[in-house]
Image (cartoon, rainbow, N blue to C red):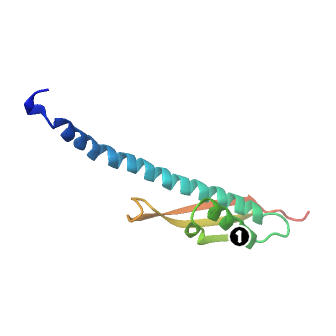
Amino acid sequence: MGERERGSAVVDFVLVMVVLVPLVLGIAQVGLVLHVRNTMTAAASDGARAAAPLGATPSDGIVRTRQLISGALADRYADDVTAAVTTIGGVPATEVVVRAEVPALGILGPSVELTATGHAVQEVEP
């Protein structure tokens, strides 16, 4: 290595890190958003199943959904949970909807709204 090349490794390192660090952080952030979305979807589906049996009410589904989200994520993701009895394809069903804001570009960046819906066939008396 000649005298003129001294310090070039530092410049190369900085140039590579300028590209590599945002790429790695972006992949981690996408992973976080997908984790939150998948957790919300699973909780909404389980909440709908909790509200579907005979004698259960939509509020039972809301409680179950909030428990699951609070156990896996922060409580703020369980703030906007709604449940209702509806009809899907002519069959009575329970629908649970979860809405939450998830930071899309880091903790202080803009956020994206995610909506997850879960359905379950409502049990009816014969």
Q: Disc 1 residue type?
A: Val
Q: Residue at x 68, y 58 (%)?
A: 45
Q: Quadrant of the N terminus?
A: top left
Callout 1: SS: helix
Looking at the rendered image, the quarter that the C terminus falls into is bottom right
Q: Is residue 2 left or right of residue 71?
A: left
Left or right of 27 on screen, residue 100: right
Q: Position of residue 91 (x, y in %)?
A: 76, 61
Can you tell which quarter of the image residue 20 is in? top left
Question: Circle 1: is it few (<14), some (14-19), or many (20+) Cα within 10 Å?
Answer: some
Instruction: Find the residue positioned furthest to the left.
Output: 4
Q: Which residue is mark 1?
A: 63
User: Residue 32: where, in percent of width, then height?
Assistant: 49, 54
Say which residue appears at 33% left-offset and 49% top-offset. Answer: 22
Tally of marks = 1
From this viewpoint, is residue 88 visible? no
Q: Which of 113 and 76 lies nearest the eye of the viewer? A: 76
Q: 13 or 62: which is nearer to us?
A: 13
Which residue is depicted at the point 69% across and 69% down?
Answer: 62
Q: Residue at x 83, y 62 (%)?
A: 123
Q: Residue furthest right?
A: 126
Q: Position of residue 122 (x, y in %)?
A: 79, 63
Compared with residue 77, is residue 41 higher up or lower down, i.e. above or below?
A: above
